[in-house]
Amino acid sequence: MTRNRDGVTLLELMVVLFIIGILSAIGLPRFASMRAQANVSAAKDQVASSLSTARAAAIRRGLPAQFHMTNGEVWVTVAEAVNGPQVIMGAKTAVSENLDVIVVPTANAETIQYDGRGFATLVGGNGKIRFSQGARTDSLCVTRLGVILKGGCL
């Protein structure tokens, strides 16, 4: 005589929940680490994008453009005329606040001015910007030629 089963026993359900609990305990710290790395990479990409925008605007117009960073907020300004005032291009982006990442520029990277040829005005070498969240850190570097090195300073 065969027995007709329509469901699962409590013991089977407990074993499955126990296995799911063990896998979660192993995997969740890894996911948190991956999320932190993704936030650091996204912050780095946003800052690199703003730097590229400033350089491209300077080259396209043949006029100075500036990249600004204060308290984790970045924005770009461009000149309207040869000796004209700087005007904000686009919107300010709160990188630190949006991605919960600490962004620390060196003193010469807080404001980077690009001339009409795309060369950066940096005092004292390359401009370095560091990004960190928890144990995850990364950096990017801007050379005097205006090149953005996403691998950090050489």
Image (tube, rainbow, N blue to C red):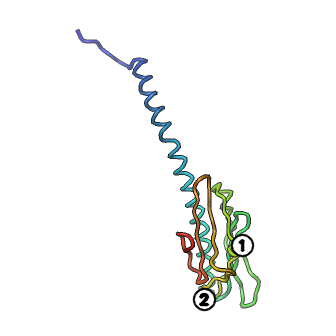
Name the spot of residue 114 as percent of width and height, x first.
65, 83
Secondary structure at badge 1 equals helix
Label 1: how many residues lie within 10 Å, few (<14), some (14-19) or many (20+)?
few
Residue at x-position 76% and y-position 87%: 84
Q: Quadrant of the N terminus?
A: top left
Give the quadrant of residue 126. Answer: bottom right
**Residue 120, labelled with which disc?**
none
Q: Please give the residue where the numbered disc 2 appears in the rendered image.
A: 117
Point out the frontmost of discs 1 and 2: 1
Q: Quadrant of residue 78?
A: bottom right
User: In the image, 135: left or right of 84?
Assistant: left
Above or below 29: residue 15:
above
Instruction: From the viewer's side, name the closer residue of 47 and 29.
Output: 29
Q: In the image as oriented, which residue stretches furthest toward the bottom? A: 82
Of labels 1 and 2, earlier in sequence is: 1
In this view, the residue in front, 63 or 30, is 30
Quadrant of the snapshot with the C terminus: bottom right
Residue 8 pos. (x, y %): 38, 20
Left or right of 116 on screen, residue 19 = left
Residue at left offset 38%, top offset 19%:
7
Q: Mark 1 to mark 2: distance in Å? A: 23 Å
Q: Which residue is identified by label 1?
A: 107
**Amino acid at the residue labelled 2:** Arg
In the picture, measured across the screen, residue 72 lies left or right of residue 43, that is: right
